[in-house]
Image: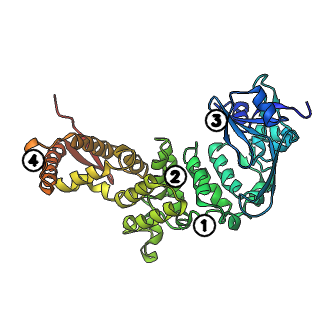
Amino acid sequence: MSNPKGIFIIGGFVRDLLLGRKPSDVDYVVVGMTEQDFLDEYPEAKKKTGKAFPVYKINGEDYGFARREKSTGLKHADFKLEFGPNVTLQEDLARRDLTINAFAMCPETGEMYAPLGRGCMSDLKAKVLRHLAPFTEDPLRVVRLARFAAELPEFTIAPETMELGKKMGLLLQLEPAERIWAETARALTTRQPSKFFYTLKDLNCLSYWFKELHNLIGIPAGPIEHHSEADCFDHAMITLDKVAKQTHNPVTRWAAIVHDLGKAATPVDQWPKHHGHDKAGEELAYNLTKRLQAGNRFKKAGQMITTQHMRIHNLCEKRAGKGARTLMYLNRFPGGISEFFKVIRADGACRSMTIFAIYVAWCLKQIKLPVHLQNKGPASGEAMLNIRATYYKEYKKDVEIQINGDCALCVLHHKKQ
């Protein structure tokens, strides 16, 4: 069928089916029909949007009309858009960013279409990410390319696509922050999120939106006996992928990325040591999340991980009151203290210490202030801290600290019932 008409499933859903992956969201395109034709066939359809082109919703799923686009300027909204029954499936698929997304499928028969030629299927089989239209029509496609590289880490990027992407750095600066962050947030949930940032680095597209992360490139991660990574950027990426194996939580993964940003602000003459990088990193993490408009959970996670990730290593040596206060504070990490310690563990902390901290924090959280000490203002807070400190001392008696090489192992001894 050279010019098919009707309702088709397009894009990522079809791609994932062809790759043998579980598809996620489904997108439908209406081809060769007027709005009235569509409504006559689907009277239950409810119009969702319609400023530039019509989109209808049926049973919670979106049906958009096939359209063709032509860039008229540098901004993402600078497009001349046309839709109607004369727009073909081929023209609609030509708007896709990558060849592997330019497939369509008939939902009734399962018949597959690759209207743009055999190259789309060959790229899919060869596991190659290749652009369709020039990135200049929408510079955000460079960021989407990086996201697909992280989602499909077994794929490689076509050389001509890499060369085109390297020219997009300045144009990418014109994009709204919310568009950059939307792609970044999705990249944080991918199979290998580090590849998103490595790809942007290779495309010379990291230095503006992710300036603080870019500034880690070339800076030693630390003394060689503790850090064998190429630099601080590499260390952040390794930590990110370790955390990604423990949790799908994008906030926790973000914390792994920013935990050592402060190393870019330490005195050069002290390298490879980075004294004070925890305090310096707080402002840098804040600036990065603010620029990207990442949201309060990401800002809070960045602030807590930068300031606390070094202080936690001597937890067992802290006085009871300070130790209890620290653990109660870490309970406020987005997602809870266990998410915080996933980053700490990935950063090199011993497993036994993290188990001890999470266990004791949970125990301290269960403590209730006696009725006669409640509702007394600051005095109640002080009383609660004293009670928790007392319990903390008891829990520390159940901890044996052993030295094994350079690692302090905290082994929790549960009390006999």
Can you tell which quarter of the image residue 372 is in? top left
- Work out whether mark 2 precedes mark 1 in sequence or the reverse, and give the earlier one: 1
Q: CA distance from mark 1 to mark 4?
A: 53 Å
Task: Count residues near mark 3 (Cα–Cα under 10 Å), then give few for <14, some for 14-19, many for 20+.
Answer: few
Which residue was labeled with disc 4?
A: 373
- Work out whether mark 3 precedes mark 2 in sequence or the reverse, and give the earlier one: 3
For the residue marked with disc 2, what is the amino acid?
Ile
Can you tell which quarter of the image residue 9 is in? top right
In the rendered image, the quadrant that contains the C terminus is top left
Which residue was labeled with disc 1?
A: 208
Q: Secondary structure at mark 2?
A: helix
- Work out whether mark 1 precedes mark 4 in sequence or the reverse, and give the earlier one: 1
Disc on res. 25: 3
Give residue 55's position: percent from left, percent from top.
71, 40
For the residue marked with disc 1, what is the amino acid?
Tyr
- Residue at the location (27% across, 56% down)? 314
